[in-house]
Image: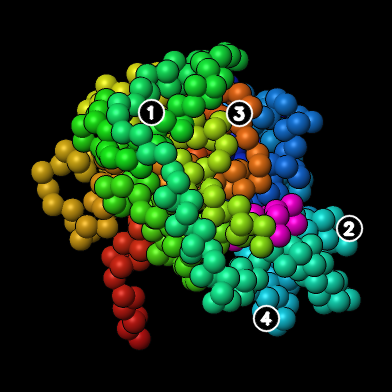
Amino acid sequence: MPSPSQPSTGERRPRAMVIDSAWRGLGPGPRALSGPGGAPLTRTVKLIVLPLIVRPALRPELAADFLDAREAEQLDALIRESGAVLEATAQWFALLKRTRRALGIVAGNPQDLYFQRCFELATEHGAPGSGADAVARAVLEDVVDASGGRTVEALKEHLADAARRARLDAELTAAWDGREAVPGAVDTGPAAEVLDACGAAGADAPAFAAMVRAGHGSLLGRALGAAHPADVWDRADVPPHLGLTAHRVPPRPEVGRSASTATLPAPLDRTLFERLFTVLQASPHRERLPTVPELVRREVGRSCAPLGLYDESLRVTVVLGGRLAVGLDPLGAGTSAAGSTAAHRIVNSRWRREASVLRARRMTVSPRPDPDGGVLNALAQDLRTPWAAYMRRLWVRLHGRDVRDAALPDAASAWGVLDGVARSVMMDHRARVRTALRALSAAAEPAAEPRSA
């Protein structure tokens, strides 16, 4: 018999929806691993639910994005059976955060650093009990030691030396002046062939390897460095650089000495410090990164390379991403002929099923003014230019791979990144719409009137 959170029909359900439903059925126990609305955090799903509970490698039937009724019931049961260990995981995470604050540790994202450690602690010890404070302190010290000084603080200290900054500035100038900027037309046509093959299940795309051999990514980077080539993406209404820079031509990188996630500039406009800041903040396995001096040394050359990347397979993936991005059409407006590949059809159809997108589509054709003062209208506007958020997130992800020397060997691995970024942007937009709706709902609720005696 199906569990209460699962339908009795034979319809296929999105795996994400099954996870969300099962998670909410756990109640308030794992609150520290949940968002304000009660759904599991994105990192909870990525770092705990999928790799440690679902384990798709051992259960390939649960690896698909859409599940049959039996598979959905199996997934639901796995999560519900893990309720006790997830509640204990949340308690360990709360304890580690309190201990972290007491020790004055500020480096890194606590979710990235501690989620999986907390699950291990919950599996081994259950909920925190006697001696848990000492265990938490030992785990935090172990994580700090494992980072090997690969922290934002270490980066800040390394770049604070005036002589070193002067030397790095000279190296940046030399590397920038030594670039090969080649103006001219850029042919992104082969990208459509790759995207069409990527969108077909199990299809191979030899054109990807051909694009890497021909240096299509380098050609685009060099053309953007010389001048804006015309009609790169077969769309006159988007800039050739797709928002990767706020300038007509990307500027020479500066050394920099500070960064804030709230005010980071466009990817190709970031300083050396800002580029490495995002890597050190986001990497859950910093012990695998080069040391800070080596990170800085390599980043000097990388920041001046075409598209700000060393590896050609990653540069080609920027070209593929650009071709995909200009054909994104969440609102179904049909304004671009660029979105004609199988990959576009997959991503656009998924996006158009989103409730937040359906509401935004109604808003774009409604003659009435936005009743909420513009909050939701601004979110609807984001769906008219989805390529901007997509390319920014794609570049950050590829840059992280470049720093870790993680090339993309074939079209399938490139498609995994491209599709993953599309999902990430979509989920981020969904979360922002939900936050806005909650805020508007709270503001609209009339103040409770006292009852008369």
Q: Return the mark for residue 413.
A: 3
At a point 47% along the width and 67% down the height, the residue shown is 256
Q: In whole angstroms, how far apart are the C-alphas of marks 2 and 4? A: 27 Å
Q: Earlier in the sequence, mark 1 or mark 2?
A: 2
For marks 1 and 3, the one nearer the N-term is 1
Which of pointers 4 and 3 lies earlier in the amino acid sequence?
4
Work out whether mark 2 precedes mark 4 in sequence or the reverse, and give the earlier one: 4
Q: Residue at x 25, y 28 (%)?
A: 231
- The numbered mark at residue 180 is none
Q: Is residue 26 above or below residue 75?
A: below
Q: Quadrant of the N terminus?
A: top right
Amino acid tagged 1: Arg
| Magenta extent | 281-291
Q: Nearer the viewer, mark 4 or mark 3?
A: 3
Q: Disc 2 residue type?
A: Glu
Mark 4 closeness class: few <14, some 14–19, many ≥20 residues within 10 Å: few
Q: Tell me, yes or no, whether the two marked residues, 2 and 4, touch with CB atoms within 8 Å.
A: no
Task: Mark 1: give few (<14), some (14-19) or many (20+) Cα within 10 Å.
Answer: many
Q: Nearer the viewer, residue 100 or 237?
A: 237
User: Can you tell which mark lies on residue 104?
Assistant: 4
Sequence-wise first label, 3 or 2: 2
Q: Which residue is mark 2?
A: 124
Name the residue located 46 percent from the left edge and 33 percent from the top edge.
218
The kind of residue tagged 4 is Gly
Residue 288 magenta-highlighted? yes
Secondary structure at numbered mark 4:
loop
Snapshot quadrant of residue 333: top left
Q: Which mark identifies residue 323?
A: 1
The answer to which of marks 1 and 4 sits earlier in the sequence is 4
